[in-house]
Image: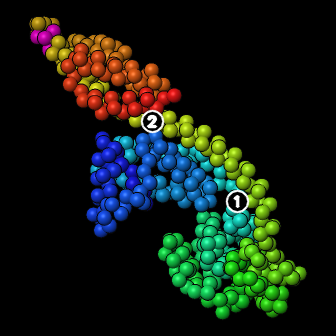
Amino acid sequence: MEIYVVALSQHRGVKEVTEWMSYTSGIPASELSQYLFLLYNKDATQHLFEVSAGLDSLVMGEGQILAQVKQVVKAGQGVNGFGRNISGLFKHAITVGKRVRTETNIAAGAVSVSSAAVELALMKLPDQASHGNARMLVIGAGKMGKLVIKHLVAKGCKKMVVVNRTEERVAAIRDEINDVEIIYKPLSEMLECVGEADVVFTSTASENPLILKQHVKELPFASEEAGRKRLFVDISVPRNVGSCVDDLESVKVYNVDDLKEVVAANKEDRQRKAMEAQVIISEESGQFEAWRDSLETVPTIKKLRGYAERLRVGEVEKCLGKMSDDNINKKTQKAVDDLSKGIVNKMLHGPMQHLRCDGSDSRTLSETLENMHALNRMFSLETEVSVLEQKIRAKVEQKP
């Protein structure tokens, strides 16, 4: 679970969230603390952007996590806590996720044995057979089997049969993955399940082959949609599928050795794309931080504009009061009003520009702080700048 918080005090923010988690869960805060992983400011922004881009996903670049980020924005509409900062952060994360996928095509290519197994199997299915209607069977619900299931789900598979010695592991996987039909079958029904499947993934710890030539040759052909040829993808070491099975014309067997080449070829490409993605994320993080910095000066900008507006209105009223009613009509009043607004806007343009902090270098950050203090003194704006000062000084100190 990830919790994103905007707080004036870092220490108090962490303390209050931890206490809330403790109260909600019934677990003492002292026990919860050892399991917390904390990121602040730019690091938190960077993390969310990487998550949204799919860099932290099991299948790098997959779209499911981006959909979850979009759901946060949707669910947050109208909620008091989903203010300008958090809303802006998540909306920007969606933009980052879309841009990374568009500009790098990072979702293409497998980088692990389990993902390569799924990718290869889907690639070998006939054009008319999609993974949506091909009958999938996973034998073994251990670590590798679970990964195969997750990769299948990430590729859009909504139904599969899982054969395992016990149902406990399969039930745990079923609870973890939503909106997917996972049917458990005991090991005693394995061959029957193989006969009803188009694609069979094997990943058990058995030291001896589970599936031999004499077992398979008696089985019915795969479905017409799968080209009547059953596909075995054996990622077990040692092998679960006997090498002699591949002699049968009705099947095709792939093992770990066949998959390594796929993994190696895609890994280099995926690393290059990840580096490209980091460049995009760094650029977008800078833009978001600049936007956040500009928000910090909003109270000062509002107070300065309010001060100038009060002066303008007062002086316009004085001017119009000195003019006789015969010489004042609506057109004249509007002309005087527009003139005063134009003068004020032009006078404020310079100060406003110097209050907009883009975070690009330490000199600009320091000047922004000095300008806020100067404006506060000159116009008695009584703006609270201590929080902003603390943030800006922290940024200046971080600069090399």
Q: Residue at x 60, y 64 (%)?
A: 154
Q: Is residue 345 left or right of residue 46?
A: left
Name the element at disc 2: helix
Above or below, 327 relative to 16: above
Q: Report if residue 94 is visible in the image.
A: no
Residue occupied by mark 2: 289
Give the quadrant of the N terminus.
Answer: bottom left
Quick check: is 320 in the magenta stretch?
Answer: yes
For mark 1, does the 10 Å Cα neighbourhood hold few (<14), some (14 to 19), or many (20 or more) residues?
many
- Where is residue 73? Give x, y as percent: 41, 52
Considering depth in this image, is 386 or 139 the residue closer to the camera?
Answer: 386
- Where is residue 62? Give x, y as percent: 60, 57
Above or below, 128 relative to 198: above
Name the element at disc 1: loop
Location of residue 277 (image quadrant)? top right
Q: Residue at x 15, y 16 (%)?
A: 314
Mark before the other along the chain sequence, 2 or 1? 1
Q: Amino acid at mark 1?
A: Ala
Which portion, as a residue range, is magenta?
A: 317-321
Specify the label residue 137 is tagged with: none
Considering depth in this image, is 141 or 338 the residue closer to the camera?
Answer: 141
Above or below, 222 relative to 64: below
Q: Amino acid at mark 2?
A: Glu
Q: Report if residue 31 is visible in the image.
A: yes
Residue occupied by mark 1: 110
